[in-house]
Amino acid sequence: MIERADILAALAAASPECPAVQLAAVPPVARLILRGAVHSMTPPPPCRAIVHEGCAVLWLGPDEFLLLAPDAIAPSVVADCVVDVSHRDTALTVAGPRAAWAINAFCALDLDQSAFPVGMCTRTLFGKSPIVLWRTATDGFRIEVARSFAPYVWACLEEARREFLA
């Protein structure tokens, strides 16, 4: 397997501390697009994600799911009608009491807890970049984004949280 470079590592290392909105690069994982049945897991309901034994399955459409898994698990799943997009995408997390606010600076979704609860996920636009947005905690989100758009998304989030820097 070809090793994936962490495109956000340098940006994360240079990012200033901000308790209100924390940004972090997510280490590389296997990303597999599943069509139809979800590999040995109960599929999540529409616009939701489920986590089981270190893997996450995100509902992307009526017969399309995104499986996030440790690289070691990927070979056992690849034979089951999947497309490996591990090298195409990367991920970052946005956390803290103002995380939703920072995302909303460039994304028009209603991120109120009642409209976008923990476990919800969707494809959407962040500025001019297509992303998959997943609410992982009350004050935490994971953004899956094409590697080529990752520095742009990171820069937008840095701009959005600038007013909270000490």
Image (cartoon, grey):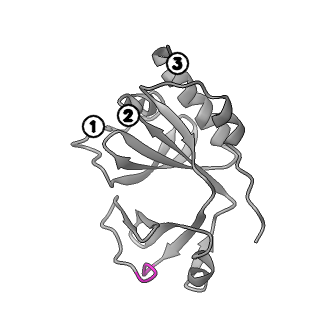
Marks counted in the figure total 3
Residue 123 lies left or right of residue 4; in this view the side is: left
Tell me which numbered mark, 1 or 2, is placed earlier along the sequence. Answer: 2
Looking at the image, do the residues carrying marks 1 and 2 touch, with CB atoms under 8 Å apart? yes
Secondary structure of the magenta portion, mostly? Answer: loop
Q: In this picture, is 138 found above or below 68? A: above
Query: Pointer 1 and pointer 3: residues touching (CB < 8 Å)?
Result: no
Label 1 Cα neighbours within 10 Å, binned few <14 / some 14-19 / many ≥20: few
Picture quadrant where residue 150 is located: top right
Determine whether 135 is above or below 153 in the image. below
Q: Which residue is mark 3?
A: 162
Question: Dot 2, crowdedness within 10 Å: few (<14), some or many (≥20)?
Answer: many
Dot 2 or dot 3: first in sequence order is 2
For badge 2, the amino acid type reads Ala
147 horizontally vs 55: left or right: right
Point out residue 4 in the picture as x, y percentages from the top left corner.
73, 58
Which residue is identified by label 1? 112
- Where does label 2 land, which residue? 100
Task: Give the residues drawn in magenta, as a range.
Answer: 36-40
Q: Position of residue 44 (x, y in %)?
A: 33, 68
Q: Which amino acid type corresponds to the residue marked 3 in the rendered image? A: Arg
- Please tell me which residue lies in front, 118 or 88: 118
- Quadrant of the rendered image containing residue 36: bottom left
Report how far apart the C-alphas of labels 2 and 3 lie in the structure.
14 Å
Query: Considering only order in the chain, which callout, 3 or 1, is on the residue closer to the N terminus?
Result: 1
For label 3, the crowd category at 10 Å Cα-Cα, with few meaning under 14, some 14 to 19 and many 20 or more, is some
Which residue: 42% across, 83% down?
40
At x 47%, y 38%, the residue is 94
Dot 2: what SS? helix
Taking the spot 50% from the left edge, 43% from the top edge, the residue there is 93
